[in-house]
Amino acid sequence: MPVTGFFAPPQTSRYALRRVHVPASLLAGPVPGPAGHDDLVLCDLVLEGGTVADIAAAGTVAAELGPDLDRSLVLPGMLDAHAHLDKGHIVPRARNQTGDLLGAAAASVPDRAARWHAEDVRRRMEFGLQCAYAKGVVAIRTHLDSPAPQPTITFPVFRQLRDEWAGRIELQPSTIGPIDILMGDEGRQLADMVAESGGNLGSGTRFLELNNSPVPPEFDVVMDHIFTLAEERGLDRDMHVDESSDPEARTLIRIARMAVKRRFKGRILAGHCCALALPGDDGCLQGRRHRHREPARGEPLPAGARPVRQQ
Ligand SMILES: [Zn+2]
């Protein structure tokens, strides 16, 4: 009889999940049956010691080895590559009044200053982890608000939670805040803390104290300094880049050129990049190429797309 509703896996080291659907695209090696129009293959999975030991044709594994799951979908654990665990669950006390980025900042920044003590951060982050775990998430990279003095409060809590959740959810931290936070002594201290925490060096690309439109000349100086901080400590980078509706926001290409010029050895994750969707005429990185061909001259482009010009 197939299992219905929730089920608990057998409490043995070796067991089977029988008659489950698995996407063929996720199977390495020979596929144990035909894939349907939706790419799903019906099969029996044998698990041993917490890993998949065998992927057999459906109905070929002994029934006593595990439940018949009646074509339930089995997927790998999910990975959340960009979370803000420290920002979660503040809505009841700090509502976004305008529903946009500025409204979120207007609500969260004073809330952070007034309420983000260690126990508050721990309680909200832990609830976020519990929610993620319940939905099958196995790894999370999270930005953690890093304007002073918050990182000295949040990072110790994060490290403690990471230890407590080891084996269930793998956690990676990244700093985040206006680009100014990585200047001077504060920047060095943050970079040291990131290195001690096994994290990534993150920031936005906008200054808190300067006019950001157009990109000010100080940008290259500070970004160069941040690259140096990362290189000295062997850190990867994880940023909010051009997180703006300003068509003058064009730091992505500067960062890319800088990384190439200095032969940066680490990895760089440039998140958000909202301004890429805006029309502009400076050419690089603005278009979505058609998959198999360039658009013909005069052919309409999708909204927000621009031809790519070779640099
Ligand atoms: Zn982020």
Image (cartoon, rainbow, N blue to C red):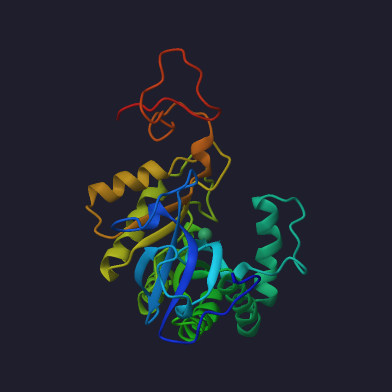
**Does residue 271 appear left or right of residue 119 in this picture?**
left
Q: Position of residue 85 (x, y in %)?
A: 57, 70
Residue 61 appears in view: yes
Numbered-mark total: 0
Q: Residue furthest top?
A: 298
**Does residue 176 appear left or right of residue 98 in this picture?**
left
Name which quarter of the figure residue 4 lies in.
bottom right
Q: Give the position of the N terminus as an image quadrant.
A: bottom right
Q: Give the position of the C terminus as an image quadrant.
A: top left
Q: Position of residue 140 (x, y in %)?
A: 48, 68
Between 4 and 119, the one nearer to me in the picture: 4
Name which quarter of the figure residue 167 lies in.
bottom left
Q: Position of residue 100 (x, y in %)?
A: 68, 49
Between 73 and 267, the one nearer to me in the picture: 73
Q: Position of residue 286 (x, y in %)?
A: 44, 33
Q: Residue at x 28, y 60 (%)?
A: 266
**Does residue 88 appear left or right of residue 176 in this picture?**
right
Q: Residue at x 55, y 56 (%)?
A: 208
Q: Residue at x 55, y 81 (%)?
A: 153
**Does residue 106 appear left or right of residue 160 in this picture?**
right
Residue 222 appears in view: no
Name which quarter of the figure residue 119 lies in.
bottom right
Q: Residue at x 53, y 70 (%)?
A: 68
Vertical placement of 9 versus 245: above or below?
below
Between 140 and 284, the one nearer to me in the picture: 140
